[in-house]
Image (tube, rainbow, N blue to C red):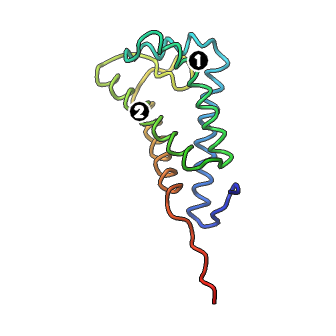
């Protein structure tokens, strides 16, 4: 599959959205990977949903998963798997942020490293990323063009 195998307007829009979303994931991963993993672990632990052994595992592994997903999205590799995985990951992130906000937790979201509190702005941003990811997933799973019948 080429970088732009679908030369329709929807295919071109999908390409732009894939590059943007993939770039966001690469950037988020880079910010987390350049800091000590323990800072990200603090943000994860503040959600109060994982045991301590899992917090460390997620803090060490999630940025690498985000990097792989981001590169896959930008390059157009494994489109169905990468868009579906991204959507599922963003559903989890978004759900946890909404849960924290509804509980009145004043915590860092952990999205782009330390120091960013959960707010309506972070919810709108992550909700927008989720919407883009869901659209890309629908595009990736839609039936492709059928070859023209031989005359």
Identify which residue, 20 or 147, lies in the foreground: 147
- Residue 111, image x and y in percent? 52, 26
Identify which residue, 149 or 83, lies in the foreground: 149
- How many badges with numbers are in the image? 2
Label 2: few (<14), some (14–19) or many (≥20) C-alpha neighbours in 10 Å: many
The secondary element bearing badge 2 is classed as: helix
Residue drawn where x is 38% and y is 26% of the image: 96
Task: Say if mark 2 contacts mark 1, CB within 8 Å.
Answer: no
Residue drawn where x is 64% and y is 32% of the image: 67
Q: Read off the residue under disc 1.
A: 60
* Relative side of 76 to 62, left or right: right
Identify the image quadrant of residue 74. top right
- Residue 146, image x and y in percent? 57, 73
Of the two numbered discs 2 and 1 on the same chain, state the one appearing first in sequence.
1
- Residue 102, image x and y in percent? 29, 25
The extreme left residue here reads: 103
Residue 13 is marked as: none
Residue 94 is marked as: 2
* Relative side of 86 to 74, left or right: left
* Relative side of 121 to 83, left or right: left
Residue drawn where x is 55% and y is 45% of the image: 81
User: Considering only vertical position in the picture, is 148 above or below 71?
Assistant: below
User: Considering only vertical position in the picture, is 51 above or below 127?
Assistant: above
User: Considering only vertical position in the picture, is 10 above or below 123?
Assistant: below
User: Considering only vertical position in the picture, is 115 above or below 87?
Assistant: above
The secondary element bearing badge 1 is classed as: helix
Name the image quarter holding the N terminus.
bottom right
């Amino acid at each position: 599959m080429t970088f732009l195998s679908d030369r329709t307007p929807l295919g071109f829009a999908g390409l732009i959205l894939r590059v943007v979303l993939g770039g966001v994931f690469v950037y988020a991963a880079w910010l987390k990977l350049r800091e000590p993993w323990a800072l990200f672990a603090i943000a994860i632990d503040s959600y109060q949903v994982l045991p301590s052994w899992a917090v460390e595992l997620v803090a060490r592994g999630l940025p690498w998963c985000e990097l792989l997903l981001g590169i896959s999205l930008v390059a157009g590799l494994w489109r169905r798997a990468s868009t579906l995985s991204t959507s599922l990951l963003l559903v989890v992130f978004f759900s946890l942020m909404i849960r924290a906000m509804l509980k009145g937790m004043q915590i860092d979201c952990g999205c782009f490293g330390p120091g960013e509190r959960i707010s309506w702005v972070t919810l709108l941003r992550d909700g927008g990323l989720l919407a883009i990811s869901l659209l890309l997933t629908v595009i990736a799973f839609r039936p492709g063009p059928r070859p023209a019948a031989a005359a």
